[in-house]
Image: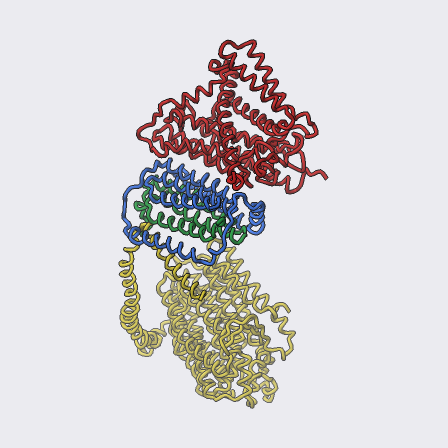
Chain colours: A yellow, B green, C red, D blue
Amino acid sequence: MPILHHLWIILALPLAGSAVNGLFGKRWSQPAVNSVAVGSVTLGLLSVFELVREFSQLSPDQLPFVGNYFTWMVAGPFRVDFALQVDQLTLVMLLVVSFVGWLIHIYSTGYMAHEGGYYRFFSYLNLFMFFMLTLVMAANLIVMFVGWEGVGLCSYLLIGFWFLKKSAADAGKKAFITTRIGDYGFTVGVLLTFATFGSIDFGTIFKSVASNPISETTLTAISILLFTGAVGKSAQLPLYVWLPDAMEGPTPVSALIHAATMVTAGVYMVARMNPLFSRAPMAMLVVAIVGAITAFYSATIGLLQTDIKRVLAYSTVSQLGYMFLACGVGSYSAGIFHLMTHAFFKALLFLAAGSVIHAVGGEQDMMKMGGLRQKIPITYWTMLIATLAIAGIPGFAGFFSKDEILEAAGAGPRANFLLWLLGIVGAGLTSFYMFRLIFLTFFGTPRYDEQHVHVHESPRNMTIPLTILAFCSIFGGWFAAPHLVGGTEYFQRFLAPVFSMYAPQPTTPQAASLAGNPESGMAHNPALELAHAILSWPVGVAIAGFLLAWWLYIRNPDAPKRLAASVRGLYSLVFHKYYVDEIYSALIVRPLLWISTNVFWHAIDEGLIDGVVNGSARAARAAGGRARELQSGNTRSYASWVLVGVLGFTVLLLALYLRGAQ
Amino acid sequence: MSVVPISYYLVLSGVLFGLGVIAFVYKRNVITIFMSIELMLNAVNLAFVTFARAHNQVDGLVFVFFVIVVAAAEAAVGLAVVIMLSQNRQSLSIERINHLKL
Amino acid sequence: MEFISQHPVLVASIIKIAVLLVLLMTALAYLTWLERKVIAHIQSRWGPYYVGAHGLLQPLADGLKFLFKEDIAPPVTDRLLYTLAPFIAFALALTAIALIPFGPPSVAFLHGQAVFSVADVGVSLLMVFAITSMGVYGVALAGWSSNSKYPLMGGLRSSAQMISYEVALTMSVVGVVLVAGTLNFNEIIGGQSGPFWHWNIFGIHQGGFPQIIGFLCYLTAAIAETNRVPFDLPEAETELVAGFHTEYSSFKFAMFFMAEYANMITVSCLATILFFGGWLSPFPDSWTWQEFLPGAGLVLLGIYCAYDTVTEMRGMARIQLAVVTLLCFGAGLICLLPAVAAVILGPFWFVTKILIILFFYIWMRGTLPRFRYDQLMSFGWKLLLPVSLANLVVTAAWLAFGWGKHG
Amino acid sequence: MSVPFLLFFVCGVLAVTGALLLIWAKEPIHSALSLVLVMVSLAVLYLLLGAPFIAAIQIIVYAGAIMVLFVFVIMLLNAGAEEHTDFSRLAKYIGLPLGVILIFWAAYWLLRSPAGGGGVTGGLIAGPDSTQRLSKQLFQQFLFPFEATSILILIAILGALVLARKQE
């Protein structure tokens, strides 16, 4: 089993690609850079497939399969191995990341074709793949943290890819700093974990938490601290503000990092640490609440955004909220499942949006689009599919995952009506703003000036990924289809071991069912369940949202303005994203800036530190002024000094010699 | 009194070395300073040979050999340098060549 | 007397030095006579003829002339060095000869002090080189201290030339040293004992490598060392009057003059020792009759002189030549005494060989034109040195791999 | 008063005189000659110490090559008496006294150093094997240093060439 015993290969490939492109790419032609970047990712994908094959031959007791490569650092009891592990969860993430990443690499070769810094872009992208894979394959918290910070770095680099554009550079900084706040919590969480369990190795932690009782408070603290990191990384309330601005980066970046993979790292982390979370109800509740509120809240913001990518960004935030909601109510598999499907359709949405932007020559404002349906059919259809998927229309991937989540929220062991309600409303809003997006973009009359912009379908290397992703957005959900619709819940059963291995005992039957033993659900009447599923609230609100959007933006397009006029206050409040950025800058940024300017910079740095430095320099100069008389540049005087030294040395030697003699 | 004490040779070499040092410090002409270096080397050689004889080992002589070789190399390069110096600045006085100063 | 018994070395050396000095002076004087004669005959002239029969008293006359000429010295000279230079040159030239063994060391007196060599140092070859290498000072200092431009240039030239060619000289000799495996003259000569094809120049015995190339290099370098034609640039009349000794006159000049000839003799001796088996006879020792060769030679010379006296000479000359004739006969008869003959054989061959080489010297002078200076330098560094080095390497390899060792 | 003892004294005195002359002489060429004097007398001392080979190369290389080079350069540069610049009081007021101190210091300590014990029977004729032993030592034990010095010489030659070349 080569790959399984050489997991590092999967990491090495993109890293090598990044290094090669970063070092030599500048001189090379685009095809060369492509072949390196895409080639490395392709090989990575293939090796992941091979890994899957080998993984299927492992017996359950071999799981999780850990490959320990070298001891990274040892300090007393603190020991970090560079260890990678594979289990079902990792495998899912690997597949999602490397598959979507692969598609997006291909897409980028088309999208970035006319951009400067081509090699730089792909070097960063490969680097991101490396760190993301590190993150998901990590076998302990520190290695995971490496990946965690690494993807943050790459996100920063790629958001600010057009660093000459101030807004882009600022967005990059914003993303970096905001996530840093979360990462601080994460770091503390890691330290606390080590303090508690004396190890940062997943296996050890889980075993010890499962075997010997740890005070719930500690676990809660750890969980919440780790969750803070997730909040930052996955753009949850209150740290979501960076994600919309991150749209300054190239669209493939938004698709890969800020929709499909990096932002879901938080969800993955929570799912990975499920043994801790499951034992900390408080933390679980916090996760669920944050998730639900974020889901609803950012959906509302999404309603009125006119920038196509920003709409998608807020939708991403909201979908992430759903995932956390799922985790919060204990249905990790649902969360991960939604993560996967979301990776498909949200990546698709972004890529399609990119294709649209590409088509209308870089315009991102939906108000300057419209009527693109016939001009760019492939983009239109794929985007429509994605929209249906995210809106939760039955039969599409999104339907199953979202349905799972809402069911867990409504009927799960940790069911909570308010959370469920928020979820439902959020779902409705989601479908509304997504269809609004579709209608504004593809229907109605063109609002761009058709003389200058000549709309064209994107090249094949962009449309093909779209098609593939569209395919996935339809069928991606099916192998998680519940019995209700004749599915086998394969996905849950596949992931079950990860979440049940260290699950707290005893678990309620529903929990067991959610953890995925299919028998429990079978009691009910299939037909009835089916009708219930089809006509269940999610579908209802989805259709409602669709109808509303249709009525507002197709039927009588001037309605929105009147509506906005009627509820001006609320409208402007939402339109300005609840002024959150302004509030933050007023409450945090400005004071911080003032303090750092006046205290740290002027007082401490200039006054104290520079004072010391300059003072020592001045002292040295003064001393030199005295000493330079000695340095006449006259060889004879130098010789005399040498002589002095020699004599002194001889005296010393003789003294020592005599000491020895006596 | 048919034997010459080792220490006489050593003293002679020491004195010669000291004179070489004095010459090095005192002389102003670059070439002469060079010569004083050679003088010191010679003094050291004398000591080497004396010890070689005293311990009846040829290693000392080998060292003398090497010293002479090095001296030759040094003279070759050094004199070339001196020539360049006197061509660039029409003086051989070490004190007119005080550009070791920063 | 007991002083003699106490310090045999000292006494013996003093005696030998005295004898050697006398002989050497005469040799030098008559070398000049020989040179002038040979050159003259090469140029189909008579050469010195009127001072004594065949100008035999010419050297004496010259010596007296030099002695009694006024010693003119330029006023602006560096007085000390100006006086020192010729003495250095002359003294060193003579000293070198003190190390040359003119005959077998077996012949001894006074507690076994070898007769035919003043000093027998372990590394006599190196010593000779050491002394000759100092010789350059005389020239250089003369050039410098004269404080005038031609001598300075002459001095510069000669010092440069001597340094350059000394390297080639030494290198060309190292081959012989390798073959002989020693630095001592007597041992070197001993290694060549036997018939003449055992000499190092042919070296066809005990795996020795023929040093013919080495000899050629040596000869060239030696001529350059002694500032002889065609390498006499330091004293190239046409270019810089008389080179380093332009400002010298009378006896100081004579000293330089003699120093030059003494050096010629020295290098000839070295050549003889290193390449031609020194005082060894070219014939196998079994031929006992060769002991009488010296005597016979002298007698023959006497007969020729007698004939010449009778037929050619008139007046004073006839008397003088008669004296010479008698001397020759006397010496020849003494040499024919068996006891003396055995002793005299070595020196005889040695002197003969030296005379041949010296003749070659003079012959060259009569034949060859002078080099240009850059030619001289490039010849020394670019041809002579590489060739001698190649000779050295080949010899070393030859000995190391034992080629040419029969069986 | 044996011959070697006499020789030692003569040569020692000559050497010291030469060194002093080196210091006193105003003309560089006089200094050079006095240095030659030192070297020659040292060579004789080497003979006395039974190292004829070293004595020979001392004269050949030092006196016969290096010093000739010095003289040559002096002649080339026509270096006259050294000019009376006296910028470095330090040299005069510290260097010289210290030098003198060094001399007596060295003399004193060497005289009563344990190495001073024992004597050397001087003989003009070396131990027969001295040169052979030296060469064996040189080419067997010290082979690498020997080669290294040859490289050094080569580099020195190159350096001299580079320095002496006409500056284009």
User: Is residue D146 shown left or right of residue C75?
Assistant: right
Quadrant position of the C terminus of chain C in the picture: top right
What percent of the width, then of the height, locates residue D11?
Answer: 43, 44
What percent of the width, then of the height, locates residue A132?
Answer: 50, 70
What percent of the width, then of the height, locates residue A580?
Answer: 34, 76
Please count the marks in the image. Answer: 0
Give the farthest residue toward the front.
C1
Nearer-the-camera pick, A244 or B55: B55
Q: Is residue A571 visible?
A: no
What percent of the width, then of the height, locates residue A15?
Answer: 51, 64
Q: Is residue A156 visible?
A: yes
- Location of residue D110 with respect to A588 vertically, above or below: above
The residue shown at (38%, 64%) is A447
Give the farthest residue toward the right.
C407
Nearer-the-camera pick, D45 or B98: D45
- Location of residue D43 with respect to A176 vertically, above or below: above
In the picture, residue A286 is in which quadrant? Answer: bottom left
User: Is residue C69 shown left or right of residue C47?
Assistant: left
User: Is residue A368 shown left or right of residue A214?
Assistant: left
User: Is residue C327 shown left or right of residue D63?
Assistant: right
Nearer-the-camera pick, C184 or A566: C184
- Location of residue A69 with respect to B58 vertically, above or below: below
Nearer-the-camera pick, A211 or A274: A211
